Amino acid sequence: MALSLDTKKNIVSKINKISNVALSAITANSQGISVNKMNQLRKSGRKVGVYMSIVRNTLLTLAIQNTAFECLKKKIKGSTFIAYSMNHPGSGARLFKKFSMKNDQFKITGAAFEGKLLSMLEINQLAEMPTHKEAITKLLITLKMSAAGKFVYILSAIKKKKEIS
């Protein structure tokens, strides 16, 4: 079904606004994936602050023009499914990577972060980057282990001092 010019302008405007505030974007080829699986992916994306959309390639190309994700133009081919990470830069990459492991037909085609097109290695690194909550948790565990280690060291020093005296 053909889209009216106003509808196309609204789509381009909406995607452009999202592109201007998103932290990162990732694209994938979703051809051959069932609608139910795509809906589950979108549902899990909403939980972590990832906006996902399937947009016609010409409209997507127009929408990302003059944004940090303009470098993705080279990767827009075929059936393009795009996800924008709004809260954490690695959310979309993490979600797509996890989904692609379960669905062989789902292929990650590209990603952009801070105006740079990422390689597959960099996409994996972005996906593995800890969230704010995970980073704070790791820091607290490290501090706790450090404090416990110092406490054990002090106790052993006291014990040695008592043995010498």
Image (tube, grey):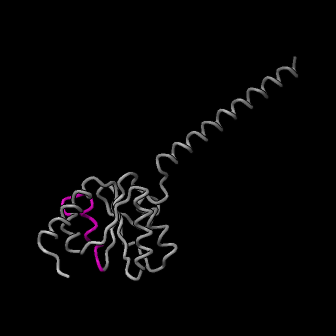
The reply, left or right, for residue 98 in relation to residue 9 is right
Front one among 86 and 26: 86
> Quick check: 15 above or below 34?
above
Residue at figure coordinates x 30%, y 72% from the top left: 54
Front one among 103 and 64: 103
Front one among 106 and 125: 106
Quarter of the picture containing the C terminus is: top right
Front one among 45 and 158: 45
Quarter location, residue 18:
bottom left
Q: Is residue 77 part of the magenta span, yes or no?
A: yes
The reply, left or right, for residue 152 in relation to residue 61 is right
Q: Residue 5, image x and y in percent?
A: 11, 72
Q: Which residues are magenta?
A: 65-78
Q: Residue 141, image x and y in percent?
A: 61, 41
> Quick check: 162 above or below 30?
above
**Residue farthest along the left direction in this orientation:** 5
Residue at figure coordinates x 13%, y 74% from the top left: 4
Quarter of the picture containing the N terminus is: bottom left
**Residue farthest along the top direction in this orientation:** 165
Q: Residue 29, image x and y in percent?
A: 37, 76
Number of disc labels:
0
Residue at figure coordinates x 47%, y 70% from the top left: 99
Quarter location, residue 12:
bottom left
The reply, left or right, for residue 140 in relation to residue 50 is right
Q: Is residue 120 part of the magenta span, yes or no?
A: no
Q: Residue 116, image x and y in percent?
A: 31, 59
Residue at figure coordinates x 20%, y 66% from the top left: 11
